[in-house]
Image (tube, rainbow, N blue to C red):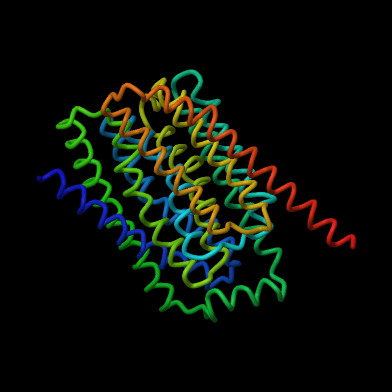
């Protein structure tokens, strides 16, 4: 009972903390007139990834590295399948060209990089430093690019998304306090969530990696879920998708990078995670490309498809935790048949759509 209370309180603190952190950081960024897409990809994405960072660091320093790995991998899978799917179900999501040209390929690339770093069974300190440097480079590039693109079109988009923001030191102080309050809530929430999750895992004799991939991953993804669905309802086209893509990039480069760089012995990767969960994370990242590329829109039927995959993945984890006899067969079908065929099908639909569009323009 106590563990469940800790778990629920931890999630509440994480959601409230992320809300304050995102609101304060977003308003601070808006005061210096950074474009909405870049705010979604950087400030909002990092803010909503802060629970993952807090939980992973706390888990790593308390010799719960499997919880830290499961948290990042599970959150990235949850972000694409559940959050992007639910957001698209609320309203079709328009995808900015920059996401297709730059950010989605980067998300796919860093997902593959995790697989390569994990082949020796560890993500060690040097791997973590490489990931952190990649995260810093990505952030500075986006900010630099945003400042270069301060044209009237970007300014109009900025005004529509955020309204006027005037720089004033009094406002800076208020937003900075909101930012600090959010960070404090995240620290408390991460401690409660990890304590509750570990206690439940020990009581049920469930592998901590399963708890990390499910309960903890879902709990730390709640800020992204709330942010993207609210953005979708408000018609904020860049925030909803940018938040998911940016959060996945930050989860790998910053959360996993900082955690493995600061962890005394690095992070051990279980063979089952390397064989299934990380490839699934890469697969859903690749799946994003044809979905976003198809008419620059994530439609409702694609949202339903993503949600169906999330249910299938969750079912696999439940079967695995209960040692169901069909677990291996179901997992193999999911990894080697269903996901690849879906990616090929989406690519075929996208290619046909582009060819029809080109023919229509030719006529």
Q: Tell me what residue is drawn at x 56 percent, y 62 percent.
A: 93
Q: Tell me what residue is drawn at x 58 percent, y 60 percent.
A: 38
Residue 281: image location, x then y, percent: 49, 37
**Is residue 145 at all visible to an observer of this figure?**
yes
Q: Tell me what residue is drawn at x 28 percent, y 29 percent.
A: 321
Please state if 128 lies on the left or on the right of 139 as rendered: left
Q: Give 177 or 185, whichever is nearer the viewer.
A: 185
Please state if 160 lies on the left or on the right of 74 as rendered: right
Residue 354 in the image: above or below residue 217: below
Residue 26: image location, x then y, percent: 47, 66
- Give the quadrant of residue 316: top left
Q: Give 327 or 217, whichever is nearer the viewer.
A: 327
Residue 114 in the image: above or below residue 24: above
Work out which residue is located at the far top of the displayed protein and give it: 120
Work out which residue is located at the far left of the displayed protein and give it: 1
Q: Quadrant of the C terminus?
A: bottom right
How many numbered marks have been drawn onto this rendered protein structure?
0
Work out which residue is located at the far right of the displayed protein and give it: 363
Please state if 235 lies on the left or on the right of 291 as rendered: left
Residue 24: image location, x then y, percent: 41, 67
- Give the quadrant of residue 256: top left
Q: Quadrant of the N terminus?
A: top left
Q: Give 14 or 221, whichever is nearer the viewer.
A: 221
């Amino acid at each position: 009972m106590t563990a469940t209370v800790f778990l629920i309180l931890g999630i509440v603190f994480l959601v409230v903390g992320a809300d304050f952190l995102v609101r304060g950081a977003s308003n601070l960024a808006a005061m210096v007139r950074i474009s909405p897409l870049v705010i979604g990809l950087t400030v909002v994405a990092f803010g909503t990834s802060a629970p993952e960072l807090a939980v992973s660091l706390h888990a790593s320093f308390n010799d719960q590295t499997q919880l830290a790995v499961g948290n990042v991998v599970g959150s990235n899978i949850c972000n694409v399948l559940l959050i992007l799917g639910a957001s698209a179900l609320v309203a079709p999501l328009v995808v900015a060209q920059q996401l297709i040209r730059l950010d989605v390929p980067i998300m796919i690339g860093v997902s593959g990089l995790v697989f390569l770093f994990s082949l020796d069974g560890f993500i060690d300190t040097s791997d973590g430093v490489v990931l952190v440097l990649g995260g810093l480079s990505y952030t500075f590039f986006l900010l630099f690019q945003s400042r270069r693109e301060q044209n009237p079109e970007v300014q109009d988009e900025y005004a529509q998304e955020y309204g006027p923001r005037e720089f004033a030191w009094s406002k800076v102080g208020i937003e900075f306090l909101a930012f600090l309050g959010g960070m404090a809530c995240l620290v408390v929430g991460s401690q409660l969530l990890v304590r509750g999750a570990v206690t439940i895992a020990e009581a049920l004799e469930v592998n901590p990696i399963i708890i990390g991939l499910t309960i903890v991953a879902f709990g730390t993804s709640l800020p992204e879920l709330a942010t993207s669905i609210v953005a979708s309802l408000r018609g904020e086209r860049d925030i909803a998708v940018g938040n998911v893509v940016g959060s996945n990039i930050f989860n790998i480069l910053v959360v996993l990078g900082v955690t493995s760089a600061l962890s005394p012995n690095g992070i051990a990767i279980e063979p089952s995670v390397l064989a299934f969960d990380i490839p699934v994370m890469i697969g859903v990242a690749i799946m994003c490309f044809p979905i976003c590329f198809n008419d620059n829109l994530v439609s409702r039927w694609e949202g339903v498809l993503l949600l169906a995959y999330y249910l299938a993945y969750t079912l696999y984890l439940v079967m695995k935790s209960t040692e169901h006899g069909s677990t291996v067969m179901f997992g193999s079908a999911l990894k080697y048949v269903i996901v690849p065929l879906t990616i090929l099908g989406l690519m075929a639909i996208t290619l046909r759509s582009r060819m029809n569009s080109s023919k229509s323009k030719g006529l």
